[in-house]
Image (cartoon, rainbow, N blue to C red):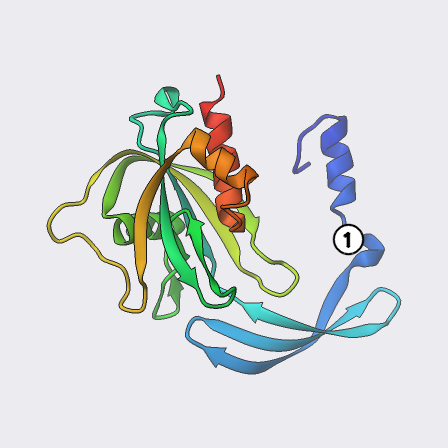
Amino acid sequence: MRFGDDALGARLDALLEPGDLNEVVVASDLVVQAAYMEWRRTTVERINGEQHVRYIVGHPGAVAILAIDAPSEAAVTPVSELLFVRQFRAPVGQLLLEVPAGTLDLHDGVTEKPQLAAERELEEETGLRATTWRHLRSFFTAPGFTSERMELYLALGLSEAGPGARTPDEDEAIEAVRLTIAEAVEAVRRGAIVDAKSLVAVAAAERLATP
């Protein structure tokens, strides 16, 4: 049992068993290798013997940070402030409001630990550090074409990193801004926040702020 010992857990287990929908990779050809990602032309085979081609982007994984300016979870209220970054995203041709986030680094073939990446990204993108960290959830960002799995962390007890703080990468132009949880929820409702990881983070923040 992965999802609980009750009736719902059993049903979820059954729903997530591939069964006749299973696909097995029978061929995988590298098309492009660029930076930390690779594009592959993958051939899969179904139970009935049919074969189909999938184009897949391999990704080492990423982190997102729900940074709340509160000393503890018990102190989180609708007027607690969340950290966002303003960043122009070339693929969609517009500026987005997003929670701090970033890709896991690779060093000599070893992937960076997610929480260490979250701590690094928070400091680089906002100039802040946190005293308390908690892993909230994992999710796939776009499973139709990429293996990217994102880990969402809650960061509390924020303070300025001070002199010598990490800064954004040279190719990043970002600005850290704050919204209260209530403002962020309303921004989602109005369509001002449309980034998927940020939608997940704001929903989590709303739950934390609800008595």
Query: Could you classify mark 1 by the number of other residues whose Cα lies within 10 Å: few (under 14), some (14-19), or many (20 or more)?
Result: few
Amino acid residing under circle 1? Pro
Note whether residue 137 is visible.
no
- Residue 50 lies, in percent from the top left, at 85, 72
When asked about the image quadrant of residue 3, the answer is top right
Q: Along the line of sight, which residue is nearer the eye, 4 or 98? A: 98
- Residue 194 lies, in percent from the top left, at 53, 49
Which residue occupies the extreme right position in the image?
A: 48
Q: Is residue 185 above or below residue 64?
A: above
Give the residue at x 57% y 83%. Answer: 31
Give the residue at x 85% y 57%. Answer: 20
Which residue occupies the extreme top position in the image?
A: 211
- Residue 122 lies, in percent from the top left, at 31, 48
| Disc 1 target residue | 18
Note whether residue 127 is visible.
yes
Q: How many marks?
A: 1
What kind of element bears circle 1?
Answer: loop
- Residue 119 lies, in percent from the top left, at 30, 47
Q: Is residue 74 above or below residue 102?
A: above
Q: Quadrant of the N terminus?
A: top right
Give the residue at x 49% y 29%. Answer: 206
Q: Along the line of sight, which residue is nearer the eye, 48 or 201? A: 201
When asked about the image quadrant of residue 142, the answer is bottom right
Which residue occupies the extreme front position in the image?
A: 190
In the picture, measured across the screen, residue 190 lies left or right of residue 4, that is left
Give the residue at x 53% y 55%. Answer: 149
